[in-house]
Structures are given as C-alpha cells and as structure tokens.
Image: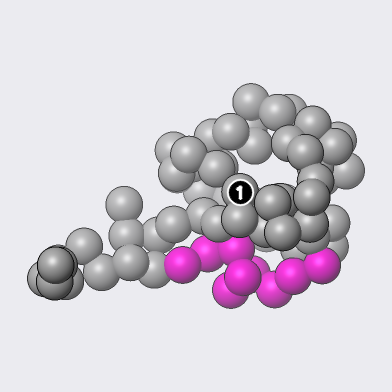
Amino acid sequence: MPIVVRIDVLLAERRMGVGEFAEKVGLTPANVAVLKNGRAKAVRFSTLESICRVLDCQPGDLLQWVDEDAEVVS
C-alpha cells in the first residue's frame, strides 16, 4: 500500500502503549491495530484530529506516501 501509517513509530518515540493510546483517542485496541498494520481503508477526520491531539503531532507525521513503483537500489 502506498500510504504508510506511522503510529507505531510515534508511540515508540513517546513511550506510549497501544492500550493507553487507544483509551485516550477513543478507539478499541483492535482498531488501533488495523491502523498500525495498514489495513484501514479510511480514517475519519475526527479520529485523525484526536490522534494528532494525543500524540501532539501533525497529520503528515502520521502518514507517509511510499512510491511502490520506485526502483529498489541495493
């Protein structure tokens, strides 16, 4: 998937567990896992706002576009 959700990186940087994060954002831990694993098809702006508030970040800190067609150089 060309859009990567970087919640796991931000949680690690803030030393915050998934359970604590899920509670503060108002999501279930299962839905946080869906976001972290890239299986989400959509994110509500209200959820994105809550995630940014809890992690004190910008939406661009959470989402990264990866060019799948880019040639990998080894």
Query: In the image shown, does 65 or 45 lie closer to the viewer?
Result: 65
Q: Position of residue 1 (x, y in %)?
A: 31, 52
Q: Magenta span covers which residues?
A: 56-64
* In the depicted structure, whether residue 9 falls above or below residue 31: below
Q: How many marks?
A: 1
Magenta stretch holds residue 69: no
Q: Is residue 42 above or below residue 4?
A: above
The amino acid sitting under disc 1 is Asp
User: Relative to the observer, which residue lies in front, 48 or 16?
Assistant: 16
Percent of width and height locating residue 28: 73, 28
**Which residue is located at x 79 percent, y 57 percent?**
14
Q: Position of residue 6 (x, y in %)?
A: 55, 57
> Which residue bears the numbered disc 1?
8
**Element type where label 1 sits in the image:** helix
Label 1 packing within 10 angstroms: few (<14), some (14-19), many (20+): some
- Residue 54 vertical placement versus 41 (above, below): below
Q: Is residue 38 above or below residue 71?
A: above
Question: What residue is drawn where x is 55% and y is 43%?
Answer: 36
Q: Residue 27, image x and y in percent? A: 75, 35
Q: Quadrant of the C terminus?
A: bottom left
Residue sticking out furthest to the front: 74
